[in-house]
Amino acid sequence: MKGVSMSVYWDKHHDTLINALIEHLGLVGLTLLLSIILASVITILIMPYRKVSRLSVNMLGAVYSIPSLALFAVLIPVFGIGKGTAIFVLTVYNQFLLVRNFLTGFDQVDASLIEAATGMGMTKWQSLSQVKLPLAFPAIIAGIRLAAISTINIATIAATINAGGLGTVLFDGLRTRNTVKLLWGTVLSAALVIIANAMLSIVQRLVDRRYKPNKSTPA
C-alpha cells in the first residue's frame, strides 16, 4: 500500500521532488567547490609549519563538533537566512575533513622524493604540483569523499533557514504529518548519499591503484 501511495504521490508531485533534488545538488556542488578551494589555500599556507598545522586542525575540529543548527542560529543575525548562510556554514564544516586529509596526504610523501626533486632543480611550486600533489591524491580524494557525504547530510538541515533542497520535503512531511512525503524525502536523500559515495569510492580506488604502488617502487 505504501508503494502505491508513493507512486501516486510521484505522479502528482514529481516536479516538486525533482526541483528539490536539483536544488540540493546545486547547494552541495557549490559548497564542495568553495570548500575544496578554501581548504587547498589553508593547507598550502599552514603545511610548512607543523605546530600551526596541528593547532589549525584542532580548531577546525572544534568548529566541526558544533551542532549545525546551533551554528546556523548564531550566524542568522549576521548573514540572514537563505542559501548564502547555508553555504557559508557548510563550507566551514568541511574544512576540518578536507584540511586534515590534505595535510595527511602531503605528510605521507617520502621526504627523499622531495629532496630528489629539489636536486633536479625543481622550484617549491613545481615540487608541490608535480611530486607532492600526485602522491597525496589518495588522501585528498578520501577527504573529498567524506566532505561530500557530510555536505549532503547537513544540507538537509539547511532547509530550516530557507536554503531549499531535499530538507524542505523532509521537514514539510514532518510538519504536515505526511508520511509519503517524508518517505520520498528520505529515499531521495539516502539515494543521493549512496550514489555519491559509490562514485567517489570508485574514484578513490582508481587513484589508490594509480599512485599507492609508486611509494614502494624503488627509484
Image: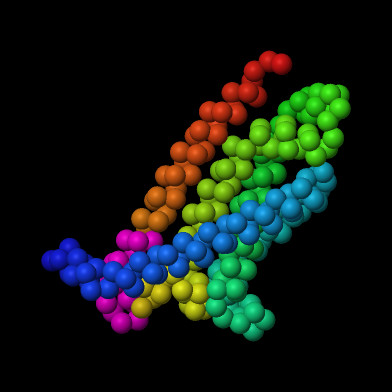
Say which residue appears at 56% left-offset and 28% top-offset: 210
Considering every residue shown, the one lying at the far bottom of the view is: 77
Q: Nearer the viewer, residue 139 or 18?
A: 18
Picture coordinates of residue 96, whole percent (x, y): 64, 55
Q: Which quadrant is the C terminus positioned in?
A: top right
Picture coordinates of residue 146, whole percent (x, y): 53, 50
Q: Left or right? Give the position of 211 relative to 52.
A: left
Considering every residue shown, the one lying at the far front of the view is: 15
Position of 49 relative to 172 (above/below) = above
Q: Nearer the viewer, residue 144 or 69?
A: 144
Magenta span includes 178? yes
Magenta span includes 89? no
Say which residue appears at 36% left-offset and 78% top-offset: 172
SS assignment for the magenta stretch, majority: helix
Position of 85 relative to 198 (above/below) = below
Q: Which quadrant is the N terminus positioned in?
A: bottom left
Say which residue appears at 17% left-offset and 63% top-offset: 3
Q: Please state the extent of the stretch shown in magenta in the rendering.
A: 173-189
Q: Nearer the viewer, residue 107 or 67?
A: 107
Say which residue appears at 58% left-offset and 47% top-offset: 143
| Quadrant in the rendering for residue 173 | bottom left
